[in-house]
Image (cartoon, rainbow, N blue to C red):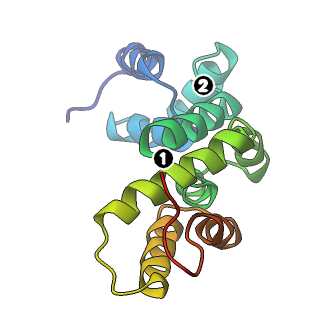
Amino acid sequence: MKNLTPQQAKEKIERYCAYQERSHQEVRNKLYALGLYRNDVEDMMFGLITDGFLNEERFAKAYAGGKFRMKKWGRIKITHGMEGKGISPNCIRIGLKEIDEHAYVRTLLELLKDKSQLIAADNVYTLRDKLSKYAIQKGYEPEIVWQQIHAFIPKKGLKGP
């Protein structure tokens, strides 16, 4: 990609930010990729924040809500994703508050029920083990996963629909 002037980069990055919420790190990386130097990047970042194109808290809320609703990720995976994007711990906490607790448990239970239909298991313990690994890998907290598995699959086998 060729180097852009600061004015060309400003127009391009404003469109980039207006399209969807972006983290500061994503925008900073994009500005460097456009060929800007450090001072120009920092000035541009300040302007984007001041003009409302960038807001870390707004990004965290959109990210957490979107990953939960669309990909059915648990809080742990969402937290790691935001940490990877350089989001502050405070904004991560604010973003995670977007997830309703009842919807969270209901979604986990739906995931477990759907997955249990696809798993061929010899016994209840194997089924529980496979379900727990699946849900924990999706980012749900182990204690909540096991609580739901024990409620959903008693020792004698599966409950009715």
The total of numbered circles placed on residues is: 2
Residue 72 in the image: x percent, y percent? 48, 47
User: Does residue 42 appear anywhere in the picture?
Assistant: no
Q: Earlier in the sequence, mark 2 or mark 1?
A: 2
Residue 59: image location, x then y, percent = 60, 32
Q: Is residue 117 visible?
A: yes
Q: Residue at x 48, y 60 (%)?
A: 112
Q: Tell us which disc is closer to us: 2 or 1.
A: 1
For residue 72, the mark is 1
Query: Which residue is at the front of the view, 67 or 134?
Result: 134
Query: Which amino acid is tagged 2?
Result: Leu
Which element type, helix, strand or loop, lies under badge 2? loop
Residue 129 vertical placement versus 116 (above, below): below
- Is 61 positioned to the left or the right of 115 in the image? right
Distance between the alpha carbons at the discs numbered 2 and 1 = 26 Å
Contact between marks 2 and 1 (CB within 8 A): the answer is: no
Q: Is residue 94 above or below residue 52?
A: below
**Residue 54: which numbered mark, if any?**
2
| Residue type pointed to by label 1 | Lys
Relative to 98, 67 lies left or right: left
